[in-house]
Image (cartoon, rainbow, N blue to C red):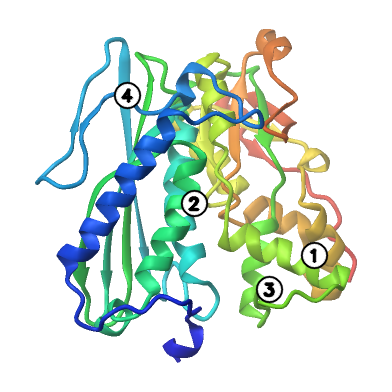
Amino acid sequence: MRDEEKEKDSRSIPPSRSEFDFIERIRQRALNQREESKGFRSSLIPHPSSLRPPSSLFLGIGDDAAVIGQQQGRETVITADLLVEDIDFRLNTTTPWLLGYKALAVSLSDIAAMGACPRYALLSIGVPQDIWNSDFVDEMYDGFFALADSYNVALIGGDVSRTPERIVIDSIVLGETPRSSAVRRSGARPGDHIFVTGALGGAAAGLSLLERGSRLRKKRPRSPHYRAVEDLLFRQLRPEPRVRWGTTLGEERLATAMIDISDGLSSDLAHLCRSSRVGAIIDASRIPIDPQVINLCGRRALDPLLLALHGGEDFELLFTIYPRDLGWLPREVGGVPVTYIGDVTNMLDGYKSPKVPACGI
């Protein structure tokens, strides 16, 4: 039941609250976010020019539309993602906070895959009446703002409406990149090396665990086994977009082609190859499989290689690079490593993935 799935806090929300009052609260929060971002600095976060606080927003939430100034020599990159209850998420496996976080994360990942820096976001939601009368929407925005604050992304608009039964979330993010430097899927050439950020298979393993009944717990058991399970659940429910990697690859013009891994390594590499009209050969032994997947695969009957190859929603970045630029490629950005997994070939060579033994059960 919905009431059992919600995490209550001390706030009391009137059943007949006005949408206008709610939008005004969000507007004030967005204004506070912008004011705080003006002085935002952290020794833990790198600040290239592309990560500076938004400076071209002339008018945000409050009018019929936002107004953004066009900066000379820059281009705007736009993406949109739709999340529908019981198709993209289930209320009995996540929380409102995590849902708001993920709604923004999937869009930030698309911007990162273009080598752009995210600047602005719009969030539109449709919810049933019982959800509107609860604290669900407020908690969802808490999660959204938690991630937006991490990257100085300003919320500049959106909409709120009712739906008969299911929750619908529409996330739009606008990013910025130097003129003609957006990284496309179509730029890979034979001889380029193929890299992937982070580790793969964790999100797919997390989804499998959810489907088998695993859940996040308010009181965390101390057992190492639960902590490993929790890590995989978070990979599915709270993905971390590789914004800093995308910005670095775009600003430094290192990636010849790039895509985020939302459908799975095998599918997304195939998308990139088709767009670039090339083939690829990858070394399965080099694929960076999430260590927790390897640790749990035996007792859960999960094949770590299959999860890494074909599982989706890792939201890591898959990119190609000229061999001559390898010396400029960082080994890690923001603590996230990068791994060489193969090479781009002529189209006639095809797309190949060597088979290796599955994890023992």
Indicate which disc, 3 or 4, sits on the residue closer to the N terminus: 4
The vertical placement of 319 against 17, above or below, is above
Question: Is residue 172 in view?
Answer: no
Residue pointed to by mark 2: 146
Report the amino acid beneath label 4: Ser
Residue at the extreme top: 324
Secondary structure at numbered mark 2: helix
Instruction: Give residue 346's quadrant in the image.
Output: top right
Image quadrant holding the C terminus, namely bottom right
- Disc 2 versus disc 3: nearer the observer: 2
Q: CA distance from mark 4 to mark 1?
A: 41 Å
289 left or right, relative to 48: right
Q: Nearer the viewer, residue 122 or 264?
A: 122
Question: Is residue 299 in view?
Answer: yes
Q: CA distance from mark 1 to mark 2?
A: 24 Å
Q: CA distance from mark 2 to mark 4?
A: 20 Å
Report the amino acid beneath label 3: Leu
Residue 238 image position (x, y, % from top left): 57, 58
Indicate which disc, 2 or 3, sits on the residue closer to the N terminus: 2
- Disc 3 versus disc 4: nearer the observer: 4
Residue pointed to by mark 3: 209
**Few, some or many residues within 10 Å of mark 4 (<14, 14–19, 20+):** few
Indicate which disc, 1 or 2, sits on the residue closer to the N terminus: 2
Q: CA distance from mark 2 to mark 3?
A: 26 Å
**Few, some or many residues within 10 Å of mark 2 (<14, 14–19, 20+):** some
Residue 45 image position (x, y, % from top left): 61, 30
As drawn, the label of residue 228 is 1
| Point 50% across, 21% down: residue | 250
Residue pointed to by mark 4: 55
